[in-house]
Image (spheres, coloured by chain):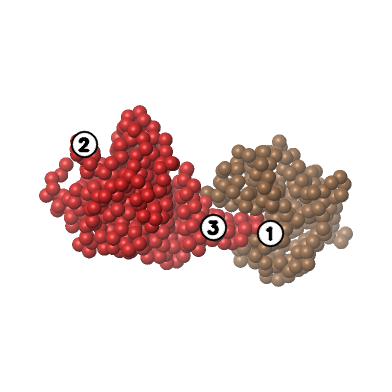
Chain colours: A red, B brown
């Protein structure tokens, strides 16, 4: 662990990728913890914004919900005794979290982690007890509500041995937060035999800058699935989550779906280190560039025998403006690995559009069907409400009907 | 039903069809023979309106309407359907979803087992399909579409011996749609075949030999096929041109 002084020196350290953000342009977000567990206390506007990022304002189909407005918790509800769901500041009072805090993410990594560390930011703490399987998803929602503010959150998820969990997290802005900054540090631990499916949906205002910083440590025969979706305009997103497959037989799958609108700068990467024998990883990225800057990075590092990993970056470019960049990287320090990648950047193939038109679909309908298939094909088991979001985004961006 | 007059078509910057005249009557099945590269697939693609074919002269009239410059989907909605020889892969679009969208009869996906395609409904269209699976998928889609005029580009190519009967049966059902007893075909067709195997199932009315962008001769399908088999295209065309 670095000491506070070292971390403070990182306050001016730019991130490796993406446009730099001046932290001094933003006030630290308000911290007004007013926690309720009655969903009726949540305003209708906030509920509507929750739904837009896959978070349901009801308890029936979810095992638990935790909700942050700016930097403070505002709603917590847990429906399962096998699940602990609480703000991390409260968790730190109950437990010694030293083996989890800043162990999967380096606080001195860049200015964003440094700021979150120095602010001792609150966030969610989710833990599933060993051997327990949480049947319906836990949902978390981060609302950045005030303009020119910086939201700093620090989250921890622990899936204990042989337990399983699904988390849906939605991040969004309030109606007045036109130009704000979101920084979310997430540290995730999937212990031996555990399983975690984590889906993150972003829906920000078009002037928002977003810098998630995530690290995940996966144990023996444990499984981590990570999905990321951003379909609406945003100022910039730069993210490069890292997963460390440290236990033998561990696996990770990353999928992302991004629309790069004009004026948006999305730099989406992903690192998986395969550090133990027999580990496997898959990174699938599907993006569409509509005049913005769209970068898809992926890096797989094989450090043990018998690892298998595949990386796939596919981008559709729908007009001449903007930039599309696919950067797939493979690195190995041992001989016995099977690591592959493929990257494709291009327009929608005309013969595919004509094939569907031959069956009677209009050109618009054909393009819409291909784009929808291209995006949905990136994530298996996409929740139905997110399919609807994709349909809406396709219609809104005039990508066919 | 279909009348083609002095049709010239370019593809890839080269003139492929050089003045095709052809008429297909209601309920008639016509067959196109011809060596590889003679322009058969280009003729079918031009009738369907596919973008890589550019009509430089002449016209195509379907049911009295000049469709020469009509978009593909409008032709499809007027009742023209096509079975492609090598259709494109459509990653992410499931066969089931396309069949449902184009289906004029909701039960077509339930009938996928008749085409031995029930295990393919959840698969991406044409991705990893074998030759025979592609043909059966095309036929399932056409059955959903219910065209009145079908263009079939080598329906038997790449199909194993066991599946050829199924493909033949499904093509036959497509052409005799809604027809009872011996009332004859209700759907017209233009079929490309090299082997003539498909003709055992559908019974063609008229055959043409296309070579070098021209229709060189026409006749009864069985006669033409016999001549081609016995003498090859070159001699067959020379002989028949003398007779014409």
| Residue under pointer 1 | B76
Q: Secondary structure at mark 1?
A: helix
Res. A169 in view: no
Query: Which quarter of the figure has residue A263?
Result: bottom left
Mark 3 vs mark 2, CA separation in Å: 51 Å
For the image, the number of numbered tags is 3
**Quadrant of residue A194 within the rendered picture:** top left
| Chain letter of the residue beneath label 2 in the structure image | A
Foreground label between 1 and 3: 3
Q: Secondary structure at mark 2?
A: helix
Q: CA distance from mark 1 to mark 2?
A: 68 Å
Residue beneath disc 3:
A368
On the same chain: label 1 and label 3? no
Which picture quadrant has residue A139?
Answer: top left
Q: Chain of mark 1?
A: B
Q: Are marks 3 and 2 on the same chain?
A: yes
**Residue positioned 26% across, 63% down in the render:** A148
Determine crowd level at label 2: few under 14, some 14-19, many 20+ residues with C-alpha closer than 10 A.
Answer: few
Q: Position of residue A399 (x, y in %)?
A: 51, 61
User: Is residue A345 found left or right of A36 in the rendered image?
Assistant: right
State whether residue A81 appears in this view.
yes
**Which residue bears the numbered disc 2?**
A94
- Relative to residue B34, is residue A306 depicted above or below? above
Front of the two marks 3 and 2:
2
The image shows residue A235 at horizontal and vertical percentages of 34, 62
CA neighbours of label 3 inside 10 A, class few (<14), some (14 to 19), many (20+): many
Asked whether the residues under the numbered discs 1 and 3 touch, taking CB atoms below 8 Å apart as contact, a structural biologist would say: no
């Amino acid at each position: 662990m670095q000491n506070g002084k070292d971390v403070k020196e990182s306050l001016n350290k730019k991130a490796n990728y993406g446009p730099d953000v001046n932290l001094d342009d933003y006030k630290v977000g308000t911290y007004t913890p007013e926690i309720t567990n009655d969903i009726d206390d949540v305003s209708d506007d906030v509920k509507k914004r929750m739904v837009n990022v896959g978070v349901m304002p009801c308890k029936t189909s979810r095992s638990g919900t935790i909700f942050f407005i700016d930097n403070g918790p505002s709603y917590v509800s847990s429906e399962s005794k096998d699940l602990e769901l609480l703000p991390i500041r409260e968790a730190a009072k109950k437990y010694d979290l030293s083996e989890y805090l800043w162990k999967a993410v380096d606080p001195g990594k860049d200015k964003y982690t440094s700021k979150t560390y120095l602010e001792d930011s609150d966030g969610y703490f989710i833990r599933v007890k060993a051997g327990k399987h949480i049947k319906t998803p836990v949902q978390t929602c981060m609302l950045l509500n005030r303009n020119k503010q910086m939201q700093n959150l620090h989250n921890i998820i622990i899936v204990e041995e042989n337990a399983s969990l699904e988390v849906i997290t939605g991040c969004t802005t309030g109606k007045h937060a036109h130009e704000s900054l979101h920084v979310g540090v997430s540290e995730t631990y999937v212990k031996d035999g555990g399983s975690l499916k984590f889906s993150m949906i972003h829906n920000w205002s078009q002037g928002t800058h977003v810098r998630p910083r995530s690290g995940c440590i996966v144990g023996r025969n444990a499984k981590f699935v990570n999905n990321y979706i951003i379909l609406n305009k945003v100022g910039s997103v730069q993210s490069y989550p890292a997963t460390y497959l440290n236990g033998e037989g561990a696996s990770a799958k990353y999928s992302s779906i991004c629309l790069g609108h004009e004026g948006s700068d999305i730099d989406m990467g992903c690192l998986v280190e395969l550090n133990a024998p027999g580990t496997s990883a898959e990174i699938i990225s599907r993006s569409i560039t509509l005049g913005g800057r769209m970068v898809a990075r992926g890096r797989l590092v094989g450090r043990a025998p018998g690892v298998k990993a595949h990386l796939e970056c596919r981008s559709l470019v729908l007009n001449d403006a903007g930039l599309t960049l696919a950067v797939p990287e493979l690195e190995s320090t041992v001989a016995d690995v099977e690591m592959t990648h493929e990257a494709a950047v291009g327009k929608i193939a005309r013969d595919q559009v004509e094939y569907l038109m031959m069956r009677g679909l209009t050109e618009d309908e054909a393009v819409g069907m291909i784009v929808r298939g291209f995006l949905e094909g990136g994530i298996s088991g996409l929740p139905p409400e997110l399919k609807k979001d994709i349909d809406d985004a396709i219609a809104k961006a005039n990508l066919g009907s | 039903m279909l009348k083609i007059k002095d049709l010239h078509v370019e593809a890839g910057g080269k003139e492929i069809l050089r003045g095709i005249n052809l008429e297909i009557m209601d309920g008639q099945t016509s067959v196109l023979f011809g060596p590889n590269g003679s322009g058969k697939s280009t003729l079918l693609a031009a009738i369907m309106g596919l973008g890589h074919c550019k009509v430089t002269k002449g016209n195509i009239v379907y049911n009295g309407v000049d469709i020469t410059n009509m978009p593909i989907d409008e032709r499809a909605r007027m009742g023209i359907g096509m079975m492609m020889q090598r259709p494109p892969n459509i990653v992410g679009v499931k066969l089931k979803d396309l069949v449902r969208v184009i289906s004029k009869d909701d039960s077509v996906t339930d009938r996928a087992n008749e085409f031995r395609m029930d295990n393919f409904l959840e698969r991406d269209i044409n991705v990893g399909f074998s030759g025979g699976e592609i043909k059966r998928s095309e036929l399932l889609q056409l059955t959903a579409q219910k065209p009145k005029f079908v263009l079939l580009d080598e329906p038997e190519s790449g199909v194993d011996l066991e599946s050829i009967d199924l493909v033949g049966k499904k093509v036959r059902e497509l052409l005799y749609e809604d027809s009872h007893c011996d009332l004859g075909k209700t759907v017209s067709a233009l079929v490309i075949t090299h082997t003539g195997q498909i003709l055992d199932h559908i019974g063609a009315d008229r055959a043409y030999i296309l070579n070098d962008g021209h229709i060189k001769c026409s006749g009864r399908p069985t006669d033409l096929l016999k001549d081609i088999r016995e003498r090859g295209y070159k001699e067959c065309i020379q002989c028949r041109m003398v007779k014409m």
